[in-house]
Amino acid sequence: MTDRSTALDLPMVDPLPEATQKYFDVCQEKLGLVPNVLRAYAFDIDKLNAFTALYNDLMLAPSGITKLEREMIAVCVSSINKCYYCLVSHGAAVRQYSGDPELGEMMVMNWRMAALNDRQTAMLEFVERITTASASITEAHRQVLRDVGFTDRDIWDIASVAGFFNMTNRVASASGMRPNTEYHSQSR
């Protein structure tokens, strides 16, 4: 195994711009690591900034979808797409936000094994459809989400998070992105 975050030869900008270095320092302080996905994008600071802006908006901004639910979406999509990087990193986030290591493992392996509420089940069924057959979504599918309490804004957020991870899964898999080893032991 190499120190590189991907199988591609795309070295990080060196030195990193001051704002980027500060962002990496905050990650190190808060997370105990700089996620390899950020290191991977750091060959092009404009691409890194675009990625982090969208990620932070989708995963951290106020929403009717909880942070745990957003991480569950990330893992559901990544499980279908078999994205090793995202299953490891976002599986750790599910364990962290839920305080339940078993839930994190169930989400990675087969979310249907988890004792989820009706809201979460409907959300993840919708996410599966987005990932495997998005053109087949109809008003009836959106109505199922409304019936369990999601607003139209929430449906937008669910679709946006699922769409983002469908994109990032493909980039991570195609580039051979490797998760930080620290993720494997977090929140267990």
Image (cartoon, grey):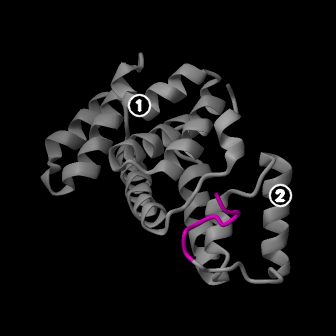
* Residue farthest to the top, as pictured: 115
In the drawing, does residue 119 fall left or right of residue 177? left
- Per the image, the residue denoted by label 2 is 26
Image height of 79 relative to 11, above or below: above
Mark 2 or mark 1: name the one nearer the start of the chain: 2
113 vs 162: above or below: above
Residue 126 point in image, percent of width and height: 28, 41
Dot 1: element: helix
Can residue 64 be seen?
no
Q: Which residues are magenta?
A: 1-8
Residue pictured at 85% horizontal, 68% vertical: 22
Can residue 163 be seen here?
Answer: yes
Q: How many marks?
A: 2
Q: Residue at x 46, y 62 (%)?
A: 168
Q: Amino acid at mark 1?
A: Met
Residue 155 spot, x, y in % from top left: 35, 46
The answer to whether the residues at label 2 and label 1 have Cβ atoms under 8 Å apart is: no
Residue 67: image tag: none
